[in-house]
Image (spheres, helix red, strand yellow):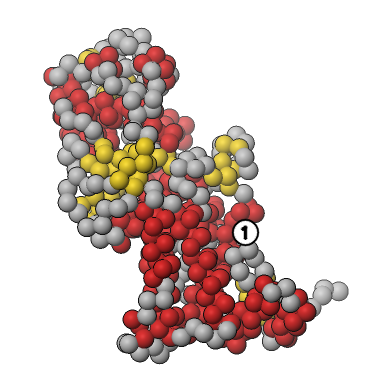
Amino acid sequence: MYYTFSIYDTLSRTKKKFRPISGEKIRIFVCGPTVYDYSHIGHARTYVVFDAFAKYLWLKGFEVQYIQNITNIDDKIIDRAQKLNQDFFQLAKTFETEYRNDMENLGIDSVDKYAPATNYMAQIIDQIERLIEKQYAYETTDGIYYDISKFPQYGKLSGRTSEEAEDGVSRIDESVNKRNKGDFALWKFRKPEEPYWPSPWGDGRPGWHIEDTAITETEFGPQYDIHGSARDLIFPHHESEIAQMEAVSGKTPLVNYWMHTGFLTVNGERMSKSLGNFITIREFLKKHSKYALRLLILSSHYRSPIDYKESAIVQAESNISTVEQFYFAICKIKEGASYYDMHSKFAEKYRERFYSELDDDFNTPKALAVIFELIRDVNSLISDKKMGRGEAYSVSSFLNDANLILGIFDPKKRADIPAEIISLTNKREQLRKSRNWKDADKIRSEVEKMGYTIEDAESGPKVKPARKNRTPEN
């Protein structure tokens, strides 16, 4: 098995060579949404990354088990349902369905199981019971709390001191009866007109953090390979998961690799409804393609921030068009290739570099750069009529594999651009590179007379049918 790739681990703050816990099987858990509203493009940032990452691992030959939780009981859900005068469970079910539709519409299909928290209530209660037995948890008048003073390593993931950790949690789980400011709720006792489940301590509902460790212990056991999410969940959510599971199991670490995605802003500002820059996935997809959002997201390293701008989406759409037209041109060249021709290894050096970049902490922007370099290089060969069927098959095979991971264009879509137009476009590009502007302009005029337009972009020329002139209104 090919283990030469590295992942940056948030806990150790280092890039580590990957070693799975169990042979060729990799178990991944990613924090899913709290389903009280439509999912936004910030959610998409995280879930597109891990969709591509899981597919990358699969293409490397690993057996991947990828699970996402669905937080379908939470203060936010209760508050929203009460404001709308709706049933709590129906509200959560509606937005869970909308979330899963959004994921399907974005081409995210690598998740093996979505795990709603309420499906694991028995396991949640069992885990709390064991924490009480081990004296990591205690009962107050309003619920069951985790005593962070019993877990000295609390804060090791986020790098917070005990005091900083306590200040952060106290604002989330407020209670005058807690032993320490930083103690967090494992079980919240029933309040009037709120959903509840029976437990040994009384009717109530789980706290936020306990659902994830109950799910992962059930599905993976006490330890697993990779936990991923956006970086805003490092504290207190993931910090608390570590405290819960390592206390219950007595084993450390809970997770071998913690992966966290960077923030997404909109025009330099944090996305919020109050600022009017809140963009849901469904709203985005009414105006743009899923490929544009995937390309925008994967054009930045997953740990880096992304600033969403309409101009960046327009550029992404243009780049997708460049890739699609190149792919279709290659497919036309390879049509009729013999079995022998198919053994060409022309694209292997690009394939090796592509995977080399992904092997280095899943560096998708550099991997994408390899694809666009391939496009530029091969366009030169096409222009000079030096691209044969075998070589074209090698290129298309590589692009298909790369697209299985990245999902940035539709390989089933067929282009209507004639091979002659593509050839002229490639020839013009070579003239432009040699600064022969006069002859390049002649070719542009020739292409336009044939009913097509050429748009120049950094990634390469884009050709499309010219729009028919409309008759001016009187």
> Which residue is the site of mark 1?
314
Residue 427 location (% of width, % of height) = 64, 81
Residue 267 location (% of width, % of height) = 63, 43
Q: Residue at x 54, y 45 (%)?
A: 306
Q: Quadrant of the N terminus?
A: bottom left
The answer to whether one can see residue 39 in this image is: no
Q: Secondary structure at mark 1?
A: helix
Q: 61 and 350: which one is in front?
A: 350
Q: Residue at x 24, y 50 (%)?
A: 26
Residue 376's place in the image compared with 266, above or below, is below
Q: Quadrant of the C terminus?
A: bottom right
Residue 211 location (% of width, % of height) = 27, 34
- Corner quadrant of residue 207: top left
Q: 135 and 338: which one is in front?
A: 338
Q: Is residue 461 left or right of residue 226?
A: right
Residue situated furthest right in the rendering: 474
Q: Amino acid at mark 1?
A: Val
Q: Is residue 141 left or right of residue 176?
A: left
Residue 222 location (% of width, % of height) = 18, 36
Residue 255's place in the image compared with 381, above or below, is above
Q: Residue at x 61, y 69 (%)?
A: 460
